[in-house]
Structures are given as C-alpha cells and as structure tokens.
Amino acid sequence: MDVSKLMFREDLMKDQRILVTGGGTGLGREMAESFLKLGATVYICGRRQNKLDETAADLMGAHGGKVVAHACDIRDADAIHAMVDEIWADGGALTGVVNNAAGNFISRTEDLSVNGFNAIADIVMRGTFYVTLDIGKRLIAEGKKASFLSILTTWVWSGSAFVVPSAMSKTAINAMTQSLATEWGRYGLRFNAIAPGLFPTKGMSARLSPGGSGDNSKNELNPMGRPGEMHELANLATFLMGPGAEYVNGQTIAIDGAGYQANGGTFYSQLQGLGDAEWDMMRQMIKGTNEKDKADRGKA
Ligand code: HXC
C-alpha cells in the first residue's frame, strides 16, 4: 500500500516548485518522489549527472509530472548560481528547498587531514549555506514565500565521536536554521530541519558501517528495534514542506524511534573499542567507495 496516500491529499503540493539537493539517491530521492507524487515540480541536483538522469526518468516514469536534473556540486557557489538561474528561467521562483546533500565518513579524528575535514565541511556547512543564500536573496528581492528544510542528525544536540566534521557542520546548519527562521521570518521564509536516526541508504552504509552485514532490517540499539522506513521520513518532510504547516518555523524535529533518548544515537559505543588494524581496513573500504563514486562522476 502507498502509505503517503493515507496521510496526504493527492494534489497537496500542486503548484509547488521544490529543489532537493542530493536528490538523485537515498533520502533525497525518497523526498523528491513524495513531493512529485503529490503534484509538485521537483528539481534535483547532485554531482553525478548519470545518476540524476536515471532518477528523474524513473520517477517520472512511475508517477508522471516533472523532475528536472541538474549536475551541480554545492561546494561551488558559481555553479549553484548558474543552476538556480536555470530553475528560475524554467518557471519562476522556487517554493521550497530541501538541503539534503551531505558527505560523511567515520574516522578517528586524529586520522583526519585538513582536506578530509574540508571535504565534509565544504559540502555540509558551506555548500548548504551557499544554496540557502543564493535562493534566499532571490526570494527576498521578489517578495516570494518559501520553506527551507535541512536534513541534519541528532548529533547537533550531542556531538558525536568519530564523525566530528559532520557533527560540527550539521550543528552549524542547525544554527543557520534557528537564526534565519527569525531573521528571514518577516519575508515569509521559514526554516526547519529534520534529524533522522538510522535510515539505511547505500551512500551512508558504505561510509558509516563499511563491511557491515548489509542486514538493515534490525536495529537492536533502538527502542523500536528497527531502523526508520523511508516513507516515514518522506511523510515528515512532506508535512513540513506542504501547505498548512506555515507556523512551524525554527524547529529541528528528530525522527529516530527515540534512539537519541535511549543511547544518544552516536557512534561512540559502537566504535570506541576498535584498534589500528580495524580503522585501516575501514578507511580502505571507504576510500574504495569514494573512488568508485568519483569515477561515476566522470561519466556523462
Ligand atoms: C580518512 C578520508 C577518508 C577516510 C576520505 N578521506 N575518506 N580520510 N578516512 N575514510 C579524505 C581523503 O584522504 C582526502 O584527504 C579527503 O578526505 C577528500 O577525499 P576525496 O575522496 O577526494 O573527497 P571527495 O571525492 O570530495 O568526496 C567527499 C566525501 C565522500 C565526503 C569524502 O564521502 C562523498 O562524496 N560522500 C557523499 C555521500 C555520503 O557521504 N553519504 C553519506 C552521508 S551520511 P587527503 O588529505 O588525502 O587529500 C550523513 C549523516 C548520516 O551525512 C547520519 C546517520 C545517523
């Protein structure tokens, strides 16, 4: 059964125009699909044109409507500006932005280089801000309302060992969410965030549990005994982006089965006992994934 249909009217997002960064894969794709199904025009961006084109074709094949794919690395403010020019030329202002694109890998902090830190901070903290700034300026100039939603983690409240650049960068975006909710509220721009617990995606599993069993059906550490299901996250995102939730502003809402309350939702207890050999092995596996993705990005 299509659970989203139980919760939302079919044309709920008609006339909405939403950009989902990192919308070609994982959580971004799920949210893009949910908005499309409910009538929105959806723009997706990411670094791999082939993956984005495939996603756009799949989603339109399944649901009709319009999904437009833009290859754009959000670390590059000029590339964002050019992409947003094209989106505006394609039908005017956006009504919503989902800051979903992210990068992360587990590592002991003492093993990180400055480049390793920047690889994550440039995407998560700087890139998310560049997207928000470019689009926010246009909306303010045109007097248009919109909803911004950022995908964070509960580490914005607790920090997390072994993912320090991600925890730092997402905490910065939590501060952006709260700050702009107040500063730009008067323009009709609202800012919220979702802090998901474990929602297994390929990109995440390869970098946060390299060599894991691949069995994502259980999550013994979570009070609910399972990871999140994609439609649950997409439903929360749809609620926050849809009409009727306009007074929700400046909030970061966890969707993690109370994992944060039960065990902090961090990597500390899982990883603090690992030794040099295990970290070396995981680093090699993560780098293998990164190289493969890089090769993919070279393809048209
Ligand atoms: C130490 C590492 C490393 C590792 C990369 N680096 N992997 N250092 N341990 N395992 C270092 C490299 O050595 C290099 O530094 C620097 O990082 C840049 O590496 P590149 O491979 O050139 O980076 P790049 O191609 O730009 O890739 C960015 C990336 C990659 C962030 C490293 O992981 C990526 O593209 N990720 C996108 C998808 C993703 O991460 N999805 C998961 C999101 S999960 P040197 O010094 O050698 O030059 C998430 C939160 C989940 O966000 C929350 C769950 C609760």
Image (spheres, rainbow, N blue to C red):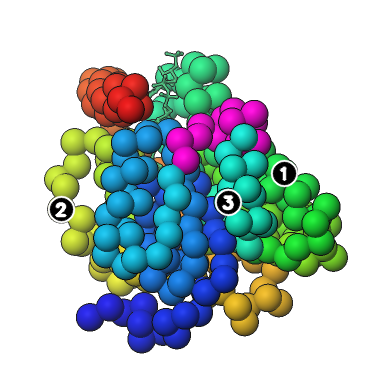
Q: Which quadrant would residue 121 be assigned to in this image?
A: top right
Residue 112 appears in the rendering: yes
Q: Which of marks 1 and 2 is in front?
A: 1
Residue at horizontal 63 percent and vertical 63 percent from the top: 95
Residue at horizontal 69 percent and vertical 48 percent from the top: 135
| SS at mark 3 in the image | loop
Give the left or right position of residue 285, taking residue 249 as reference: left
Q: In what quadrant of the picture does the N terminus appear?
A: bottom left
| Residue 201 pos. (x, y %) | 30, 49
The answer to whether marks 2 and 3 mark residues whose Cβ atoms lie closer than 8 Å is no
Amino acid type indicated by mark 2: Asp
Q: How far apart are marks 3 and 1 (CA)?
A: 20 Å
Amino acid type indicated by mark 1: Leu
**Callout 2: CB less than 8 Å from ligand 1:** no
Q: How crowded is mark 2: few (under 14 residues within 10 Å), some or many (20 or more)?
A: few
For residue 90, the mark is 3
As displayed, is residue 87 above or below residue 260?
Answer: above
Instruction: Tell whether position 77 is magenta.
Output: yes
The answer to whether marks 3 and 1 mark residues whose Cβ atoms lie closer than 8 Å is no
Q: Nearer the viewer, mark 2 or mark 3?
A: 3
Identify the magenta region. 70-81
Instruction: Tell whether position 126 is magenta.
Output: no
Q: Which badge, 1 or 2, comes first in the chain's sequence?
A: 1
For residue 215, the mark is 2
Q: Name the residue under label 1.
A: 133
| Residue 70 pos. (x, y %) | 47, 40
Amino acid type indicated by mark 3: Asp
Give the left or right position of residue 283, taking residue 152 as reference: left
